[in-house]
Amino acid sequence: MKNLTTTSLRVRENQLWILDQQALPQQSDWLPCADVSALVDHIRTLRVRGAPLIGLSASLLLALLAEGGMPQPQLHQALKTLRESRPTAVNLMNNLDRMKVALEQSDFIPKLVNEALRLVDEDKALCASIADHGAGLVKPGSCLLTHCNTGGLATAGVGTALGVISRAYQQGNVQQVWVDETRPLLQGGRLTAWELGERGIPYQLICDSMAASLMALGKVDAIWVGADRIAANGDVANKIGTYSLAVLAKYHGIPFYVAAPHTTHDPHCPNGAAISIEQRDPHEVTGVSGSFGSVQWAPLNANVYNPAFDVTPAALISGWVLDVGVVMPEQVSEGIFQTSLK
């Protein structure tokens, strides 16, 4: 496979490398990923994260394993194992469905390589298109609030919601960005703050619980988030804490936008209640870990509820900004998400 580089994935001399997103922003560590067990561990520990990036990393690894001589039966098992690594983000399933079609061909090795590279190129184009569509919704002088991380660290391109914010800033329409820290794993405080700083975009980091007071003071003009899955009725699964922002936005009359590629849409999922929500390790809530080490602040025997995602009902969303265009609430009511989007 040819060499390639994105913000958080690299292929060098037929070896996949991933940027350890648990070490950021203090350290930029590139970790080798030579087999399925290594990638599954990276995904589950969120060294690799972001719905599009998870799908791309799995696709690239499959192609590299095929080039390295792994036979078809083992590749099928590898695909199955990777598919089960995270249940909520549908991009992983969509990408692997395409890789499975390639794997079933007689000349499966070049087919897998070409499909994996095609998926990377497509994601870059999808991100650029999302940014173009979304930037038109950002008014001059806007102070925007975002949650989790939806930039180049989560995609192969400029990002989804953060890509929109970046494009709108380039157009002179963003005054500053409020960045939710995004408990419990601090993807906003660690990753989005780092990306915005790298792009020279003014931002202020806030605790998640501060968002309501900012809205009450009239300091938030719109909220932009990503998505891990969009159901057929327009409900959206995204990082835990997204739903509360949508409720607050509705109360304060603030536009709430979801930015995602069409690959995040799942027409086979009828509504948010049908989305499998991943429950994660209790230690993520009872303390914190990072490049600095680990700290435990809760009682060792504390009972913990730790869902990775929540579901935002379609009724709370002002618009779904996709690479294929902006979907408005009335279009959702007419059933636009009940069929495949391309």
Image (cartoon, rainbow, N blue to C red):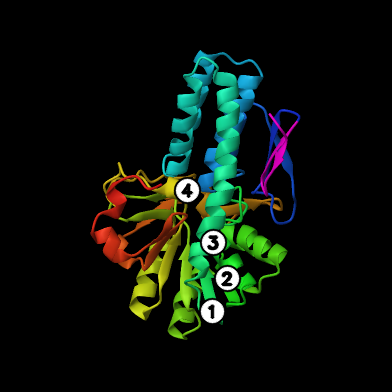
Which residue appears farthest toward the bottom when viewing the image? Answer: 217
Residue ID for mark 4: 301
Mark number, residue 142: 1
Marks 3 and 1 in Cβ contact (< 8 Å) = no
Secondary structure under tag 4 reads loop
Please tell me which of labels 2 and 3 falls first in the chain: 3
The part of the chain drawn in magenta is: 1-12
Q: Can the viewer see residue 264?
A: yes
Secondary structure under tag 3 reads helix
- Counting other residues with Cα less than 10 Å from the Cα at mark 3, is it few (<14), some (14-19), or many (20 or more)? many
Of tags 4 and 1, the one toward the viewer is: 1
The Cα atoms of the two marked residues, 2 and 3, are separated by 8 Å
- Counting other residues with Cα less than 10 Å from the Cα at mark 4, is it few (<14), some (14-19), or many (20 or more)? few
The Cα atoms of the two marked residues, 4 and 1, are separated by 45 Å
The Cα atoms of the two marked residues, 4 and 3, are separated by 45 Å
Q: Is residue 304 above or below residue 315?
A: above
Q: Position of residue 33 (x, y in %)?
A: 66, 32
Identify the amino acid type marked 3.
Ala
Marks 2 and 4 in Cβ contact (< 8 Å) = no
Of tags 4 and 3, the one toward the viewer is: 3
Residue ID for mark 3: 131
Q: Can the viewer see residue 161?
A: no
Q: Is residue 340 above or below residue 108?
A: below
